[in-house]
Amino acid sequence: MNLKNKVLNELKSTEDFISGQQLADFFGVSRNAVWKTVKSLQNDGYLIESVTNKGYRLLSANDAIDTNIISGFFDDLDEEINIIHKTRVDSTNNMLKKLYFESIPFNTLLIADEQYDGKGRFGRNFYSPSKTGVYFSLLIKPDFHTETPSIITSLTAVAVCDSISMLTSKKPGIKWVNDIYVDKKKVVGILTEGSIDFETNNFEFLIIGIGINISTSDFPKEFRDKAGSLSVNISKSELIGTIISNFYKLYHQFPDKSFMSDYRKYSIMFNKKITYKLNNVTYTGEVVDINDYGNLIVSSGDGISTLTSGEVTIIDF
């Protein structure tokens, strides 16, 4: 074990300060080597407090991805979760798809510190800078037919909202079908992709990608009007672990779709005037319901429409 891991493990072992001299004596190195190691850990994203005459202390709200902390949230799950952590990838969905074809196991969670080509819906980009957000994708093998794929996105949105509500004082809301808003700004994007076996009408695999802006503030011009951040002091590892744990707990409830009541509770769509497209024609209507398959029920001058996919815009949001 290298010095960085040794120092990190020692800091994790207590909530008290540990002096640089204690660490130096314990590991048989100089105080300068300890100082350089702490600086390196801080550059990696670990929140380490340094106080003269006291030493160093690892703060509980930690900014670094720690797979050991994340895996601790999966102890009570039936599934065995395989975790992969990368510093920088084009897209966690893209990379996980490539790894799938290299025969990695289902229930693999891929986490990246940064995406340089993060994917959103309709070919859009999801801005994914390092250190200010979390970006991860999960590979699963659903055991249901392809008639209800979009509902997995709805389930995931509930898991994310539940987790944000549990860990922060923020009030998340779901904009149909896959965006999560806080204070009228988009802070989370969800993108679900998969492959279908057309002979059996079953999924070969599904990949669920989640991107969360935690403290991102300097957005590119095209995102500034709509994008925001959670703006809370939160452990990235705790957030990821909680979301994935909540996802599997809801996933086991999939047959009765009981989670859809929570989806409706979190929805910001009800009674909102929206514009939407059907067959390349733009309509205006009012959202009256969301059914158990995650479809949007809209009332307009032409009657009641059921939207199974597509994009909607809330008027005067």
Image: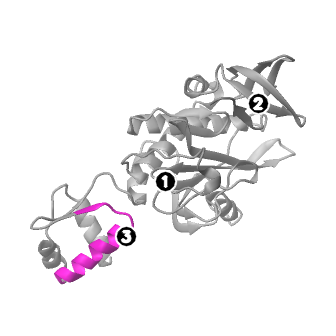
Disc 2 on helix, strand or loop?
strand
Please tell me the numbered disc located at residue 275.
Answer: 2
Q: Is residue 40 magenta?
A: yes
Towards the viewer: 253 or 261: 261
Q: Is residue 45 above or below residue 213?
A: below
Q: Residue at x 39, y 34 (%)?
A: 169
**Could you tell which of marks 1 and 3 lies nearer the N-terminus?**
3
Q: How is the image coloured?
A: one colour
Q: Under tag 1, what secondary structure?
A: loop
- The amino acid on which the numbered mark 1 sits, given as a three-letter code, is Ser
Q: Position of residue 133 (x, y in %)?
A: 49, 55
Query: Which residue is depicted at the point 65% across and 19% down?
Result: 271
Write down the region rendered in magenta: 30-49
Q: Earlier in the sequence, mark 2 or mark 1?
A: 1
What residue is disc 3 on?
A: 43
The quadrant the C terminus occupies is top right
Q: Is residue 76 visible?
A: yes
Q: Position of residue 256 (x, y in %)?
A: 63, 24
**Neighbour tally class for label 3: few under 14, some 14-19, many 20 plus, Cα within 10 Å:** few
Front residue of 282 and 198: 282
Rounded to the nearest whole Å, what is the CA distance between mark 1 and mark 3?
19 Å
Q: Residues within 10 Å of mark 1 (few under 14, many from 20)?
A: few
Image quadrant assignment for residue 48: bottom left
Other residues around mark 2 within 10 Å, as few (<14) / some (14–19) / many (≥20): some
> Could one spot residue 78 in this view of the protein?
no
Mark 3 vs mark 2: which is more N-terminal?
Answer: 3
| Residue 165 marker | none
